[in-house]
Image: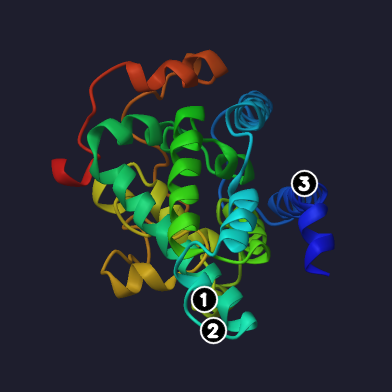
Amino acid sequence: MEEIIVNKEAFIRISCFFWIFFIVALSEILSPRRTLTVSKTKRWLTNLGIVVLNTLVMRFTFPILAVGLAITAGEKGWGILNIVAIAYPLKVLLAVVLLDFAIYLQHVMVHAIPLLWRLHRMHHSDVDYDVTTGTRFHPLEIILSMLIKMGVVLMLGPPAIAVIVFELLLNGTAMFNHGNIKLPIGLDRVLRLFIVTPDMHRVHHSVKPEETNSNYGFNLPWWDRIFGTYMDQPSLGHKEMEIGIDKFREPQEISIFRLLTQPFRGEVGKYPINKR
């Protein structure tokens, strides 16, 4: 079964992407949390255009991705989990959790280092918040993220199936928790004990720096609570809060060219953690 999943990785990932995207996008229509402020068509064309570009960049930049590296690490006996004797199911579960923790730390890092914030702020400069925001990352940040992920894979030595599960969870939950979806308050309270919900992560996209620098989790919500970066609700509430950052809010900024050049324009601003 594992070999089949590994061989069908690309098909599984693409299928999951489209199905989750469709479900979240439909939910946004049926039960929207906020009223969008700019042209949805223009934003979607730009944000999804970035997805296509990033996909091409990844395929041409990395001849071997994290899953392939995990297979090689397993064959060579590289990494902690290939050295320590652990039952296979526990090894898979532990690997998924540790990979998620690494992504949390990476997310904090790109908010802490001004140079990296220049790359990451493209994600935050979206003035609306919906499923496409969860796919909007600068190609240079995507490359950096893959390099970090591959380094973690070499260090941990996770099973290939764990890397696939983690990637599916990360991509799926990124679309879900960026969804413009109104969940019942009680359901949200229960869900955010196990997974990052749209209301939990939306706080992170507030224009206020003290709220932007909170709720870094993408998939598992526990790291924010453990390390003191959790914020329950935005100060102005979810309907009144302003989304984005204080720069790049002009209509002309909603273009692929402007997004790609954004890291090289303007000042760093007050958002990096050490600038607070």
**x then y, percent, for residue 181:** 62, 56
- Report the residue marked by disc 1: 94
- Report the residue marked by disc 3: 10
In whole angstroms, how far apart are the C-alphas of marks 3 and 1? 23 Å
Q: Secondary structure at mark 3?
A: helix
What amino acid type should be assigned to the residue bearing mark 1? Leu
What amino acid type should be assigned to the residue bearing mark 3? Ala
Badge 2 vs badge 1, beta-carbon distance below 8 Å: yes
Judged left or right of residue 254, residue 203 is left
Query: What residue appears at the point 57 percent right and 59 percent down from the top-left corner?
Result: 76
Coloration mode: rainbow
Badge 2 vs badge 3, beta-carbon distance below 8 Å: no
Residue 71 image-quadrant placement: bottom right
Front one among 184 and 192: 192
Residue 223 image-quadrant placement: bottom left
In whole angstroms, how far apart are the C-alphas of marks 2 and 3? 28 Å
Mark 2 or 3 closer to N-term? 3
